[in-house]
Amino acid sequence: MEFQGLSTDQAPPIWVPLKFFITAPFFGVLFGLFVFFTPSELFLSRFSVESIIATHLLTIGFFGFVMVGALTQMLPVLAGAKIPKPKLLSTASHLLLVFGVLSFSIGFYINSSAILAVASALLGGGFFIILFGIAFAINGVKNLTPTIKGMRISVAFAMGIVVIGVYLLYGYVVKDIDATHLSIANIHSVWAIFGFAGILIVSVSFQVLPMFYVAPHFKSFCKKRVVNIIAFGLIFWMVLNLVGEFDFLAKFVISLFFFAFATTVWIKLNKRRRPISDVTIWYWRTSSISLAIGVLVWFFGELILDEYIVLASIFIGGGFIMSIMVGMLYKIIPFLVWFHLNASGYMSIPTINEMIDKRYLKVQFYLFIISILGFVASFFYLPLLKVFALCFIFSMVLLQYNIVLPVRLYVKTKKTKPDFDMSMFGDVR
Amino acid sequence: MDSIKGYLTNDHRKCDGLFAKMEEAAMTFLGDAKSLAEEFIKETERHFQMEERVMFLEFEQKTGITQGPTAVMRHEHTQMRGLMKQLLESIESDNKDKFFGTCETLMILLQQHNMKEEQMLYPMAQQHLATESARIVDMMDSMIVE
């Protein structure tokens, strides 16, 4: 049947992005459990083993998985770019990354050089397999839109942070941690947050905001220059950081443009032509506010107290990056289910709104927001951390439930016979 | 005279506007959205036909590619026609939940479809049909919807 061929032509097989998406909340839950069961004061230093484990459960396990899944889904749709052997690459990468994050955490927890060595091979391999596939696909795109160009830069930063990450892990394997190590770890984290995740989110928003909400398009300057300026700022920041002076200059550039992006998103949402307001809009708004506060704390906070970096991370990592990701998962997963079922000839598919109970979406959103605010409060009063870690666990369990429901519907429906309603062919000329 | 790309892209924006208006009306009372839904569907159907009966045919004739992007776009038109039918049915049965759910699916499908056209197919068409651009736009503009 021609239909099958057509649908695979325009989108990757459904499990390519889905397997990454549905794994993300699992790591969110692990993060919550780890924070809950670990003595809170161990998180006071960002370089403690506990902080490293917690951070990576979320940054690789949640952010990394969602971003890789989103890239594999968006590239074919946005640019007709095809990742070679998508099923094979994504399966291999997914497995390597899942066991990579787990062995990374265990290796640090029990202080085992051997397990950390395995983790660096798994994570390095897992990321490089998929990132090279993505880079290959981008390389074949003829019509380079600002979004695709931004994705290219983001993927370049991703490759950079993976190389640095493997190098840093090697330091722990051979137990050689000096001041340079911490300085490089700082570059690793800033590039990961602003270079990989930040630039990817900015570039994707150029398409997604007008697309999902009929919001006004971003200005040409924004689309053509901002990503390059941020990328330049991040490289400039690395140089100044290694030199050890004036890094606030580059930090200023990065903060300024992310702050501008945050306010632009807010304004675009206000001017959107679709009046409907759902949980995904609330997530975008949360994201916008958190980013604005986060970069202010990042820029000014460290001038006051080094520890403020933790506060900045809560706002930027949790409030900004994670909010957008959760919001987008709620849009993308039900759509993918509908799209793939429809393309396979199933006609009576529940609508997106019928796939996930709206009440659960709201509860999940509130639990998530309370946890983020709670983490902020815990920064000032540490005993609160456990309570909000618990709240975060609930929000992640509910997220997992909410996004597994449409996937379950997909699996169940696929087991039945398609309708093949012939009226579908009637209008094809 | 507009280019093929410019003409059809503007038409996408016009349909987006009608869609947003329809949703806005439906928020207060679903019945109010009926005429706006009909208008949106009429304009969208016109857009589909301008492509299927004029531009796609010219493109396929010129390039010899019949099983490529135009086939994918035709298939998505069919998917959207199905959803637009459901949209009217949900208004008839006064089912707000079904209406907004269908809107959501239709909107995403429509937008990613538009994006593929605007970023891939239209530039290709403009490139291959540059010399006949004015004639093709004129034909689309004066086409009578079947």
Image (spheres, coloured by chain):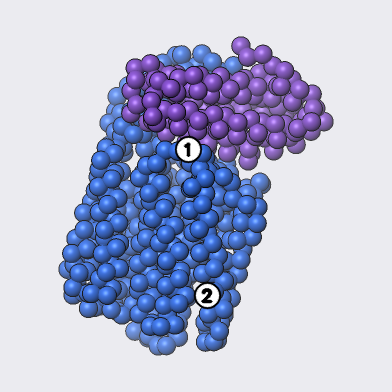
Compared with residue A85, is residue B134 higher up or lower down, i.e. above or below?
above
Image quarter where the N terminus of chain B lies is top right
Identify the residue at image location x=49%, y=25%.
B80
| Disc 2, SS | helix
Residue A100 picture location, percent across and down = 34, 63
Q: Which residue is mark 2?
A: A251
Q: Residues within 10 Å of mark 2 (few under 14, many from 20)?
A: many
Look at chain A in the picture and name its colour: blue
Chain in purple in the render: B
Q: Position of residue B81 (x, y in %)?
A: 49, 21
x and y percentages locating residue A187 in the rendered image: 47, 75
Instruction: Write down the residue under mark 1.
Output: A274
Which amino acid type is marked by label 2? Lys
Give whichever of A236, A297 is nearer the camera: A297
Foreground pick, A91 / A76: A76
What kind of residue is marked 1? Arg
